[in-house]
Image (cartoon, rainbow, N blue to C red):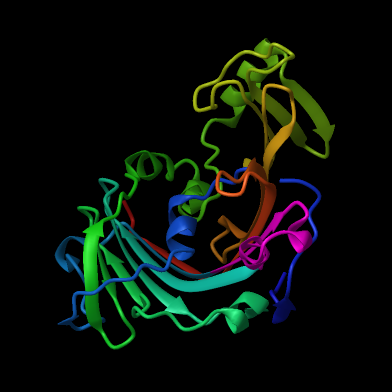
Amino acid sequence: MKQKNTHVKRSRLSASKPRRLSFILLLAASSIFGACQKEVDILKPVNDTKFSTAAVKLKYEVETLTVPEWDNADNSEPQVRIMSMAFSTRNKVEVNISEDGASNWRIERMSPKTDVEAEHLSPPGVEPETHLTVIDESGVGRFYDAKGAMLHSNPVPIPSYKEMMANFKTNPNSLFSILGAPSVDNLNQIIEKAKEAGGIQELGNNMVSVRTGKNSSGVARSEGILDNTSKVDIYNKDLGLCLGSTLYDQQNQILCQTFYSYSVTPDQRWFPNRIYMKGWDNDPLTGKMRAQESTTYFENVTINIKNL
């Protein structure tokens, strides 16, 4: 499904709670400012020697449209009305991953295809905006403006892809966990554990829902689930893909929902072309309930894999 140029003002949402972002989505949505003006070549790779023959080289463009909303925002203070406006970001991303799971990143800011009202109302910033972010394998990020001047550098925590590199020979789809889609490396095991705990439901068409965690129904806990929450994942058993997840609180109220849409690469690998997230929470600054929707589109995805 191709993304169209659109103009977005605001979206009406019924309620409001938190969303989670993967490492790269968080980077893609960030604009970091700085003051140190040091001329550098923005095209020069950082720590290039190790990654000249990287095991995995992934390139893609990513755009995220975010639509926040507070309850009764139209009747509240101007700050809340402004913070309720939709905003969008777009980046070109290159990531190299070595056999031991280390990685480096190059993230270049682009003009979003989605036109939003907030961009027209926001005054120009005083500080120069980050145009390019380069992160080396040690987790040091360097941030540059559009003219190639380094604004500043600071630590950027990056995950290790050691486990992913160990699994991708048997599960080629696991590579695209980099984009934020769950890696499903042991679906049969997941299903068997859910059956033992009574947390599984067959949905037909080779789809199954698996509930993990603990809530008022007394379902057993599972590793990786927040305290007093439960999670329901929808899987396609034939393809080994997660199609969506819903996080519930102790009262079985929805905290966050995520849905994944996939495409197939020429070499028959499934990758996410769109991720939709909606979450609700209570804003600590205003005390108002808010909802937040985000839709992330991936385009021009290319991947090169060295024979291991």
Question: Residue 267 appears at what percent x and percent y?
Answer: 54, 62
Q: As displayed, is residue 289 above or below residue 203?
A: below
Q: Nearer the viewer, residue 124 or 192?
A: 124
Residue 203, position as x, y percentages in the image: 83, 33
Q: Is residue 26 above or below residue 153?
A: above
Residue depicted at 77% across the width and 63% down the height: 74
Could you tell me which residue is drawn at 58 percent across and 71 percent down?
A: 88
Taking the image as shown, residue 126 lies to the left or right of residue 135, namely right
In the rendered image, the vertical position of residue 64 relative to residue 288, given as above or below: below
> Does the magenta run of residues contain 71?
yes
**60 or 62: nearer the viewer:** 62
Q: Quadrant of residue 130?
A: bottom left
Seen in the picture, residue 32 relative to 199 is either above or below; the reply is: below
In this view, the residue in front, 34 or 23, is 34
Q: Residue 90: in sight, yes or no?
A: yes
Classify residue 300 as left or right of residue 46: right
Total numbered circles: 0
42 lies left or right of 288? left
Residue found 67% across the figure and 22% down from its top: 250
Quadrant for the N terminus in the image: bottom right
Q: Is residue 136 visible?
A: no
- Quarter of the image for residue 287 reads top right
Q: Is 180 in the magenta?
A: no
Q: Quadrant of residue 254?
A: top right
Q: Position of residue 136 (x, y in %)?
A: 23, 60
For the record, the magenta segment spans 63-85
Q: Nearer the viewer, residue 176 or 219?
A: 219
